[in-house]
Amino acid sequence: MIPSLKSKKKIETVFEKGKVLKSGSVFLKFHDFNDDEISFGISVPKKNFKSAVLRNRIKRQIREIIRNSSDIRKIKKGISFFIIYNGKNSPNFDYLKRTILDSLEKI
């Protein structure tokens, strides 16, 4: 299982120096730290989803996609990434899975 991105310095570095991939309503920001751990973070803006229930549901779905994906093991060691769902409507699981896995393959 991939740990969550908790370090404030790493999060700031990912957003300042990281590269961006966009696939549909999903933004993937990533940066290579050249260490031995892969970590990730998830964001769903409150601006687009006022209800915390919807935001948490989307985050749970994204975590489930990452947890069950075999493509994660192909990612180079040392890369930390942040997934941002920036859509206006609540997505279905299949759409999220397809767009996130497409983005992760490009890393």
Image (tube, rainbow, N blue to C red):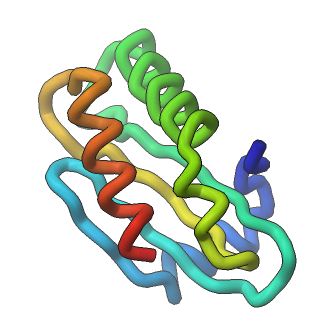
**Which residue reaches farthest top?**
53
Looking at the picture, how far across and down is residue 52, in whole percent? 43, 16
> Most extreme residue toward the right, as rendered?
36
Residue found 14% across the figure and 26% down from its top: 89
- Height in image: 42 above or below 82? above
Q: Residue at x 48, y 20 (%)?
A: 56
3 up-or-down from 44: above or below: below
From the top left corner, tell me how far across and down residue 100 is, in percent. 36, 50
In the image, what residue occupies the spot 47% across and 35% down?
A: 62
Q: Quadrant of the C terminus?
A: bottom left
Residue 95 vs residue 13, the one in the foreground:
95
Q: Closer to the camera, 17 or 19? A: 19
Q: Is the residue 19 above or below the residue 8 in the image? A: below
Q: How many marks?
A: 0
Task: Give the image quarter of residue 75.
Answer: bottom right
Q: Position of residue 21 (x, y in %)?
A: 31, 72
The residue closer to the viewer here, 11 or 96, is: 96
Say left or right for 8 vs 20.
right
Quadrant in the rendering for residue 97? top left
Q: Quarter-wise, where is residue 67 in the image?
A: top right
- For image coordinates 43% across by 62% down, the residue present is 104
- In the image, taking residue 40 as reference, residue 104 lies left or right, namely left
Q: Answer above or below: position of 38 versus 62.
A: below
Task: Looking at the picture, tell me which residue is in the foreground, 38 or 18.
Answer: 38
Image quadrant for the N terminus? top right
**Where is residue 42 drawn, in percent x and y?**
52, 45
